[in-house]
Image: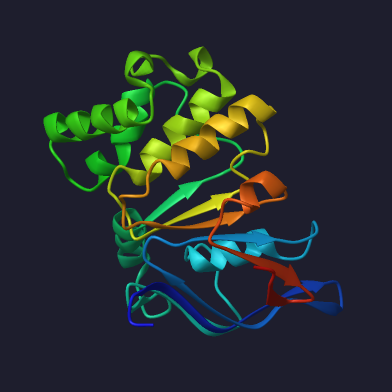
């Protein structure tokens, strides 16, 4: 599978609770191909968010490795991790995590400005992505002036503005009503021309049903459901 954009091998994670140890992930092996969407499901507390944090280099495994486009997290300095994360990864959470004092296009442009793009280029790309996600007329609105679904679509635009290798999504429709959730899912389905791959942690069956693969995290291992 030489087209894999994300690989984890032997990934294990244990948490200490007083004098006892709780093993959450048990030697996971996982590969994600370009343009693939994988849904990860499982009961609360099964370790889904922990897995996302490890895939995104936000936490350290007890053993095993994660690579993004062949680059592993483990040997990188903190600065190099930030650069790899900004270049190759996007993140979308249940709460949008938009900056309240900035409008929609300023939020979307932020990863580009951090990466050193000029103000003009960053703004142009941000506005193009907002238009693509049906938000051209909301570009100058701050998060407080947007609906929940609009805020989440702005967060998706921000995650995609650099067209990263992988976008990690943690319950992206968890705070939305069914109509807004459907609009967000339709937005993702319309992005089939991108090479970006998606890993989506979700409790929502309608979200999982749209994925290319469904994996259940159960007893610390990933079990294919489809």
The residue at the point 34 percent across, 33 percent down is 108
Foreground residue, 140 or 31?
A: 31
Quadrant housing the N terminus: bottom left
In which quadrant of the rendered image does the C terminus lie?
bottom right
Give the image quarter of residue 105: top left
Residue 166 position in % (x across, y down)? 40, 59
Residue 121 relative to residue 109: left or right: left
Relative image position of residue 49 (x, y in whole percent): 65, 58
In the rendered view, tell whether residue 130 sits above or below residue 30: above
Task: For residue 201, say whether it is visible.
Answer: yes
Q: In the image, what residue occupies the spot 17% across and 45% down?
A: 116
User: Is 154 above or below relative to 70?
Assistant: above
Q: Position of residue 123 (x, y in %)?
A: 21, 29
Measured as percent of width and height from the top left, residue 120 is found at 13, 29
Relative to 29, 117 lies left or right: left
The structure residue drawn at horizontal position 32% and vertical position 63%, both measured from the top left corner, is 84
Q: Nearer the viewer, residue 210 or 159?
A: 210
Count how many numbered circles sit on residues in the image: 0
55 lies above or below 66: above
């Amino acid at each position: 599978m030489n087209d894999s954009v994300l690989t984890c091998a032997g990934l294990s994670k244990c948490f200490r609770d007083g004098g006892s140890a709780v093993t959450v992930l048990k030697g996971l092996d996982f590969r994600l191909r370009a343009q693939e969407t994988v849904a990860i499901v499982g009961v609360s507390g099964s370790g889904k968010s922990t897995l996302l944090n490890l895939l995104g280099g936000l936490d350290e495994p007890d053993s095993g490795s994660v690579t993004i486009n062949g680059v592993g997290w483990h040997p990188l300095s903190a600065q190099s991790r930030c650069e790899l994360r900004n270049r190759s990864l996007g993140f979308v959470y249940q709460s949008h995590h938009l900056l309240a004092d900035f409008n929609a296009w300023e939020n979307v442009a932020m990863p580009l400005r951090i990466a050193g793009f000029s103000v003009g280029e960053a703004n142009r790309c941000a506005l193009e992505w907002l238009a693509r996600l049906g938000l051209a007329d909301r570009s100058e609105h701050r998060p407080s002036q947007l609906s929940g679904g609009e805020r989440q679509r702005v967060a998706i635009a921000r995650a995609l503005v650099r067209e990263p290798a992988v976008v990690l999504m943690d319950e992206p429709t968890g705070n939305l009503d069914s109509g807004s959730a459907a609009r967000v899912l339709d937005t993702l389905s319309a992005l089939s021309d991108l090479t970006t791959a998606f890993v989506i942690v979700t409790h929502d069956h309608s979200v999982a049903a749209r994925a290319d693969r469904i994996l259940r995290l159960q007893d610390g291992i990933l079990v294919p459901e489809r």
